[in-house]
Image (tube, rainbow, N blue to C red):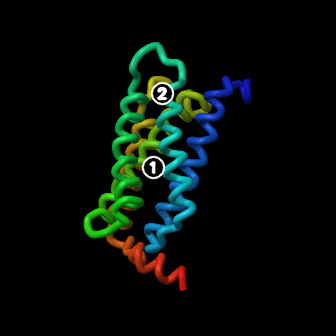
Amino acid sequence: MVLGMPPLTFIHVVISLIGIGSGLVVLAGMLNAQRLDSWTATFLSTTVLTSLTGFLLPAPHFLPSHAIGILSIVVLAVAIAARYSFHLAGGWRTAYVVTASIALYFNVFVLIVQSFLKVPSLHALAPTQSEPPFAIAQGTVLILFVALTILAVKRFHPEPFVQARTAAAR
């Protein structure tokens, strides 16, 4: 046990927190028209690992977290292709911003769910997660992510990938 968690759960939580932290940096970069290549690689890889390790955690049956994991893998596949295969060209820039933001939102959504399950003061406010404090927290985060995603789509116009590589080689 690590901090009261089985080792796999602890590793999953650490990877998830790294994914959320690096994802917030990437989102800030998108809002400032910066690609942030290293942060992006960290965000995308840890977010994929978060989804994959989530399927390894013990569960009595298919849970909503499994559905979020499947959806996350789908949007991450699009984000990774848009970023690394299509180099943000044309509509792939928008696809990348939207899918990367959705993947980050899914991680934050699950963080809120887990916080209301595991943190005693939050659990007391919404023991069944159908109470107003839980709905307010999730609704606020959803609205914030929608607004930030729209803003990022408008602002994220980084230097084209090919030109950036050529300039770096000089």
Quadrant where the C terminus lies? bottom right
Q: Which of 54 and 161 is in front in this view?
A: 161
133 to 89, vertically: above or below: above
87 to 9, vertically: above or below: below
Looking at the image, can residue 66 be seen?
A: yes
Identity, as a three-letter code, of the amino acid under mark 1: Leu
52 to 140, vertically: above or below: above
Residue at the outermost left position: 91
Which element carries disc 1, helix, strand or loop?
A: helix
Which percent across, then down, holds residue 118? 59, 29
Q: In this view, does 141 lie to the left or right of 45?
A: left
Q: Residue at x 54, y 28 (%)?
A: 117
Sequence-first disc among 1 and 2? 2
Q: Nearer the viewer, residue 129 or 73?
A: 73
Q: Residue at x 39, y 27 (%)?
A: 64
Which percent across, then down, holds residue 151? 36, 67
Identity, as a three-letter code, of the amino acid under mark 2: Phe
Which percent across, then down, holds residue 168? 53, 80
Q: Which residue is drawn at 49% across and 34% down?
A: 52
* Mark 1 crowd level (few <14, some 14–19, many ≥20, 10 Å Cα): many
Which percent across, then down, holds residue 21? 58, 53
The CA distance from mark 1 to mark 2 is: 18 Å
Q: Which mark is residue 140?
A: none
Which element carries disc 2, helix, strand or loop?
A: loop
Q: Residue at x 31, y 69 (%)?
A: 89
Judged by depth in the image, the label closer to the viewer, 1 or 2, is 2
Residue that label 1 marks: 104
Q: In this view, does 4 lie to the left or right of 100?
A: right
Residue that label 2 marks: 55
